[in-house]
Image (cartoon, helix red, strand yellow):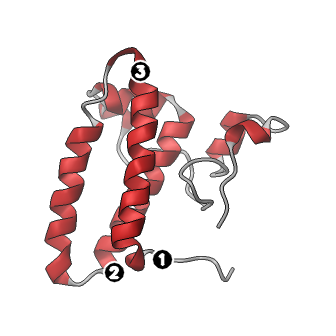
Amino acid sequence: QRYTAPDQMAWIGQDVACKYGLCGPPVFDDTLAVPSFDCRAAKLQSEIAICSNKRLARHEASLSKFYFQAIRAMPINEKEAFRVEQMTWLKYRDSCQGDTIETCLLQRMEARWNEVMQKWGKYAVRNDSQ
Protein backbone atom coordinates (compact mmCIF):
# COMPACT_ATOMS: atom_id res chain seq x y z
CA GLN A 1 0.00 0.00 0.00
CA ARG A 2 1.16 3.51 -0.67
CA TYR A 3 0.09 7.06 0.10
CA THR A 4 -0.22 9.56 -2.70
CA ALA A 5 -0.73 13.17 -1.73
CA PRO A 6 -3.37 15.04 -3.76
CA ASP A 7 -0.98 17.93 -4.42
CA GLN A 8 1.27 15.48 -6.30
CA MET A 9 -1.53 14.91 -8.81
CA ALA A 10 -1.79 18.38 -10.32
CA TRP A 11 -1.70 16.96 -13.84
CA ILE A 12 -5.21 15.53 -13.42
CA GLY A 13 -6.46 17.82 -10.69
CA GLN A 14 -7.21 17.09 -7.05
CA ASP A 15 -10.99 16.75 -7.55
CA VAL A 16 -10.56 14.19 -10.31
CA ALA A 17 -7.86 12.32 -8.38
CA CYS A 18 -9.96 12.13 -5.23
CA LYS A 19 -13.12 11.18 -7.11
CA TYR A 20 -11.36 8.09 -8.36
CA GLY A 21 -9.87 7.15 -5.01
CA LEU A 22 -6.36 8.42 -5.59
CA CYS A 23 -6.10 10.46 -2.43
CA GLY A 24 -7.46 10.04 1.03
CA PRO A 25 -6.49 8.11 4.11
CA PRO A 26 -2.87 7.16 4.50
CA VAL A 27 -3.29 4.17 2.19
CA PHE A 28 -4.30 3.63 -1.41
CA ASP A 29 -7.55 1.83 -2.08
CA ASP A 30 -10.37 1.96 -4.60
CA THR A 31 -12.93 3.87 -2.53
CA LEU A 32 -14.64 6.67 -4.45
CA ALA A 33 -15.14 10.11 -2.90
CA VAL A 34 -18.84 9.48 -2.23
CA PRO A 35 -19.97 9.71 1.40
CA SER A 36 -21.60 6.66 2.96
CA PHE A 37 -24.67 8.72 3.90
CA ASP A 38 -27.24 10.61 1.84
CA CYS A 39 -25.95 14.16 1.39
CA ARG A 40 -29.49 15.37 0.63
CA ALA A 41 -30.35 14.56 4.25
CA ALA A 42 -27.17 16.09 5.73
CA LYS A 43 -28.01 18.39 8.64
CA LEU A 44 -24.92 18.45 10.85
CA GLN A 45 -22.09 20.86 9.99
CA SER A 46 -19.72 17.90 9.76
CA GLU A 47 -21.96 16.08 7.28
CA ILE A 48 -22.38 19.19 5.13
CA ALA A 49 -18.61 19.74 5.11
CA ILE A 50 -17.99 16.10 4.14
CA CYS A 51 -20.51 16.34 1.31
CA SER A 52 -18.95 19.52 -0.07
CA ASN A 53 -15.29 18.41 0.04
CA LYS A 54 -14.06 15.48 -2.07
CA ARG A 55 -11.08 14.77 0.17
CA LEU A 56 -13.26 14.59 3.28
CA ALA A 57 -15.82 12.51 1.38
CA ARG A 58 -13.07 10.08 0.38
CA HIS A 59 -11.86 9.76 3.98
CA GLU A 60 -15.38 9.23 5.30
CA ALA A 61 -16.25 6.67 2.62
CA SER A 62 -13.04 4.72 3.20
CA LEU A 63 -13.60 4.62 6.97
CA SER A 64 -17.19 3.52 6.50
CA LYS A 65 -16.17 0.84 4.02
CA PHE A 66 -13.61 -0.53 6.46
CA TYR A 67 -16.10 -0.39 9.34
CA PHE A 68 -18.65 -2.55 7.51
CA GLN A 69 -16.01 -4.98 6.23
CA ALA A 70 -14.64 -5.39 9.75
CA ILE A 71 -18.07 -5.83 11.35
CA ARG A 72 -18.85 -8.63 8.88
CA ALA A 73 -15.50 -10.35 9.48
CA MET A 74 -15.13 -10.10 13.26
CA PRO A 75 -16.40 -12.55 15.85
CA ILE A 76 -19.72 -11.70 17.42
CA ASN A 77 -18.15 -11.10 20.83
CA GLU A 78 -16.11 -8.15 19.42
CA LYS A 79 -18.84 -6.51 17.33
CA GLU A 80 -20.59 -4.63 20.12
CA ALA A 81 -17.36 -3.07 21.40
CA PHE A 82 -16.50 -1.91 17.88
CA ARG A 83 -20.00 -0.48 17.35
CA VAL A 84 -19.89 1.45 20.63
CA GLU A 85 -16.40 2.72 19.84
CA GLN A 86 -17.52 3.87 16.39
CA MET A 87 -20.64 5.64 17.69
CA THR A 88 -18.54 7.45 20.30
CA TRP A 89 -16.04 8.46 17.63
CA LEU A 90 -18.80 9.72 15.30
CA LYS A 91 -20.00 12.08 18.06
CA TYR A 92 -16.41 13.27 18.48
CA ARG A 93 -16.05 13.74 14.69
CA ASP A 94 -19.32 15.66 14.55
CA SER A 95 -18.13 18.11 17.22
CA CYS A 96 -15.88 19.77 14.61
CA GLN A 97 -17.35 23.16 13.75
CA GLY A 98 -16.60 26.65 12.54
CA ASP A 99 -13.93 28.00 10.22
CA THR A 100 -11.53 25.12 10.90
CA ILE A 101 -14.07 22.35 10.35
CA GLU A 102 -12.34 20.85 7.30
CA THR A 103 -8.95 20.68 9.02
CA CYS A 104 -10.57 19.31 12.18
CA LEU A 105 -12.45 16.61 10.27
CA LEU A 106 -9.42 15.66 8.23
CA GLN A 107 -7.24 15.31 11.34
CA ARG A 108 -9.87 13.32 13.23
CA MET A 109 -10.56 10.98 10.31
CA GLU A 110 -6.85 10.36 9.70
CA ALA A 111 -6.35 9.65 13.41
CA ARG A 112 -9.37 7.33 13.42
CA TRP A 113 -8.07 5.49 10.34
CA ASN A 114 -4.75 4.84 12.11
CA GLU A 115 -6.54 3.81 15.29
CA VAL A 116 -8.91 1.33 13.66
CA MET A 117 -6.18 -0.16 11.49
CA GLN A 118 -3.99 -0.70 14.54
CA LYS A 119 -6.75 -2.11 16.73
CA TRP A 120 -9.12 -3.75 14.23
CA GLY A 121 -7.00 -3.99 11.06
CA LYS A 122 -6.81 -7.77 11.28
CA TYR A 123 -10.39 -7.75 9.96
CA ALA A 124 -9.56 -5.62 6.92
CA VAL A 125 -10.28 -7.13 3.54
CA ARG A 126 -7.04 -6.93 1.61
CA ASN A 127 -6.77 -6.46 -2.15
CA ASP A 128 -2.96 -6.49 -2.31
CA SER A 129 -2.74 -9.59 -4.51
CA GLN A 130 -4.61 -8.04 -7.43
* Disc 1 + disc 2, Cβ < 8 Å: yes
Q: Mark 2 sits on what residue?
A: 73
* Disc 3 + disc 2, Cβ < 8 Å: no
Under circle 1, the secondary element is loop
Under circle 3, the secondary element is helix
Q: Residue at x 57, y 51 (%)?
A: 32
x, y percent for residue 9: 78, 41
Quarter of the image for residue 13 reads top right
Q: Nearer the viewer, residue 78 or 130?
A: 78
Quarter of the image for residue 96 reads top left
Q: Mark 1 sits on what residue?
A: 125
Q: CA distance from mark 3 to mark 1?
A: 33 Å
Q: Residue at x 40, y 49 (%)?
A: 111
Q: Specify the amino acid type for callout 3.
A: Thr
Q: Specify the amino acid type for callout 1.
A: Val
> Which mark's residue is nearer the viewer, 3 or 2?
3
* In the depicted structure, whether residue 96 falls above or below residue 79: above
x, y percent for residue 77: 14, 81
Q: Residue at x 64, y 43 (%)?
A: 18
Q: Is residue 55 left or right of residue 94?
A: right
Q: Earlier in the sequence, mark 1 or mark 2?
A: 2
Q: Which quadrant is home to the C terminus? A: bottom right
Quarter of the image for residue 114 reads bottom left
In the current view of this chain or complex, which residue is farthest to the right?
A: 11
* In the depicted structure, whether residue 49 falls above or below residue 112: above
x, y percent for residue 102: 45, 28
Q: Mark 3 sits on what residue?
A: 100
Under circle 2, the secondary element is helix
Q: Specify the amino acid type for callout 2.
A: Ala
